[in-house]
Amino acid sequence: MTISNNRRKTLISGIQPSGQVHLGNWVGALKNWVRLQDDPNYECSIFVADYHSLSGDYDPQDKRRQVLEIMTELLAAGLDPEKCTLFRQSDIPEHTELCWIFNTLTPLSFLERMTQFKDKSGQQDRNVNMGLLDYPVLQAADILIHHGEAVPVGRDQVQHVELTRDVARFYNRKYGVDYFPEPEPYLTDTPKLRSLTDPLKKMSKSLGEKSYIALSDEPDVILKKIKGAVSETEGRLTLTEAELDELLTKPLEERGLDEETLRGQAGVWNLIGLLRLFGHEGEAQRFVDSQPIRYGELKPLLAERIAERFADFRERKRELEAYPDRVLKIFAAGAERARETARKTMEEVRRTIGIR
Ligand code: AMP
């Protein structure tokens, strides 16, 4: 069965090969992918977004290893090629062809206001390349070339899925067709995770190793990173989570609180949020109820819970690492399947837009 001609909803999402999978990826996306591959309402495709990752600073020597590592980690996390089409983006060059066509439909102003573009341009200010700006258009092509209807992503990507909906509408309107669906983001029930070193930013590989916990981190590394996490020094929650979130959506001058205070509150809520996710029933609430929060207790407990949760993952990753060829084969077979749909879409698009 190809991706587009069945009655299940087409679900598609991707992850960049730019380091190890971290807890933010897990909470925001991967956890959902693993669950949804068993949901009979969806036909799932998950891809390694290697074209996208070229827009970040990187060393070409590392890329091949990073691609293999992320493939290995997706399998170790439980994605199953029997249930879900797994492929590498650059195995399907049609994604970039459709991106070009979408470029001609997308207003520049829409791309310039994307939060991720603004963040990343700041982070890599010596390498503000066109790929950073065009990132969401390639993402639109990734989704729409497979007629994606549901896109399970983290909250940080919702704006990009909105743009995909715009692009689908622009295309359909310009060419007078009802061809591309307007996909919906599919969110987990967890808000985005924050960086351990700067909790006012999202947990991300680009902020350095200490800012995130990788799924494959060993228990001692997890403990060290959590011990170093920035949080409010007194252990007092002076804002509720909702108040904090609301303040952070406001411009700096309207917040009425200095950045350090907000960073401290964001940090402590991030730790509590992590314990809610990975701790046992009631553990997180116990700390909230008995303030000041004793970090000497909270941090080692949290580290232990995270390490326990991913013990199986670490084991499976080690097993898979012994057979890199098997991993590559799985993704090559997935690409063959996904490419059938992509080819068909591109043939139809070329005819519609008048170049064939
Ligand atoms: P990336 O590593 O940027 O390719 O992201 C892969 C997926 O993880 C995307 O769906 C993101 O929305 C999600 N994601 C990345 N960082 C976070 C975070 N800190 N919190 C929640 N979701 C995240």
Image: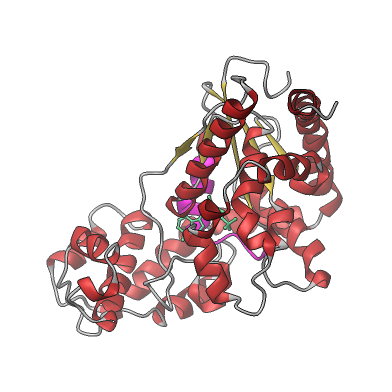
Q: Quadrant of residue 111?
A: bottom right
Would residue 300 appear left or right of 10 to someone viewing this image?
left
Tell me residue 235's x, y (percent).
21, 79
26 shown above or below 94? below
The correct choice, above or below, for 126 with respect to 55 in the image is below
Q: Is residue 131 above or below residue 90?
A: below
User: Residue 293 colored magenta?
Assistant: no
**Magenta region: which residues?**
18-34
Looking at the rendered image, the quarter that the N terminus falls into is: top right
Residue 51, position in %: x, y?
A: 74, 54
Q: Main secondary structure of the magenta part?
A: helix
Q: Image point 52% across, 44% down: which residue? A: 163
Residue 75, compared with residue 251, is above or below; it is: above
Residue 31 falls inside the magenta stretch: yes
Work out whether residue 258 or residue 203 is closer to the camera in this orientation and state it.
Answer: 258
Quarter residue 324 falls in? bottom right
Which of 106 and 223 lies nearest the eye of the viewer? 106
